[in-house]
Image (spheres, grey):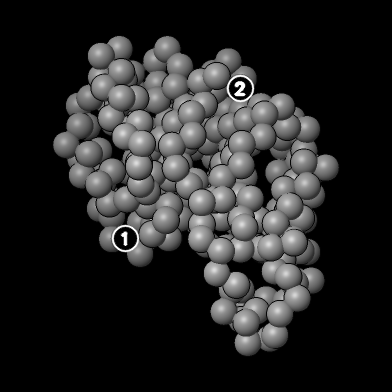
Amino acid sequence: MPLHYIHHSCFAYSDADLLIIYDYWRDPEGLLPKFLEEAKRDEKAVYFIVSHFHEDHFNPDIVNWCAERKEERWYLLPSYDTVRRRRIDKTLPLAVLRFGETVQTPHFTIQAYRSTDVGVSTVVTLRDGTTLYHAGDCNNWYFPPCTEEEMSSHVKVTPDQMEKLFLSIIRDLRADHPNIDHAMFPVDPRLGQEMLRGPLQFLKAINVHHFHPMHYCTPVQM
């Protein structure tokens, strides 16, 4: 399978002429250098997609890498909030991802959708029609029963508001992509008994051929 899990919410997708790296943060198994070396050897284009600015989804090293390797076709596709909060030079990205917008690259089309947190979720459509959905931090962050003080430390809306927002985003996604080949989606242990609520709602709405859980290495701190 050309989709490889690296760590937390980071995946690498590779084919004959490109390599896509999603939400690179850490690489405890040392997998990324191997993929990047293969890309250099095979003269592949390399794309780093960043869904949002949170520390566990963004490593500033990728900004330097893309700046140093422009002529090698290394590209950066950060979300709008990542550019602002991480102060990324706007001349560096191939494009800035904003929800509701579509970007055409030399190798794929990428559509940005809303998130229930910050940043965007994205669908990449490759030239052969393969679709890749990366949720970023888009999930039904429906925490188990807790006090209002505990809830406010996690999210700024009520559970019902969160669920309505999540389901509306999924409806928007389904209108464009009722079928998705690869979906990378949070399965977060901090949600306790509600950990599978969002993933199951997502899978009920979208026909997903391959589901890839992510975000599950987060320590449980309730």
Position above or below: 135 against 70: below
Q: Residue at x 35, y 56 (%)?
A: 83
Q: Mark 1: give few (<14), some (14-19) or many (20+) Cα within 10 Å.
A: some
Position above or below: 167 against 3: below
The residue most toward the left is 68
Image coordinates of residue 213 in percent, x first then y, are 61, 42
Image coordinates of residue 106 in percent, x first then y, are 41, 24
Task: Give the label on residue 86, or none.
Answer: 1
| Residue 89 appears left or right of 14 | left
Looking at this view, is 77 or 190 the one in front?
A: 190
Image coordinates of residue 189 in percent, x first then y, are 62, 58
> As shown in the figure, which amino acid type bears the numbered disc 1?
Arg
| Residue 61 appears left or right of 107 | left
> As shown in the figure, which amino acid type bears the numbered disc 2?
Thr
| Residue 208 appears left or right of 28 | right
Q: How many angstroms separate mark 1 from mark 2 (CA)?
A: 31 Å
Residue 135 makes an appearance in the image: no
Residue 189 makes an appearance in the image: yes
Image coordinates of residue 147 in percent, x first then y, are 70, 85
Q: Secondary structure at mark 2?
A: loop
Q: Residue at x 40, y 21 (%)?
A: 18
Looking at this view, is 222 or 2 the one in front?
A: 222
- Dividing the picture into quadrants, the one containing residue 214 is top right
> What residue sits right under mark 2 in the picture?
130
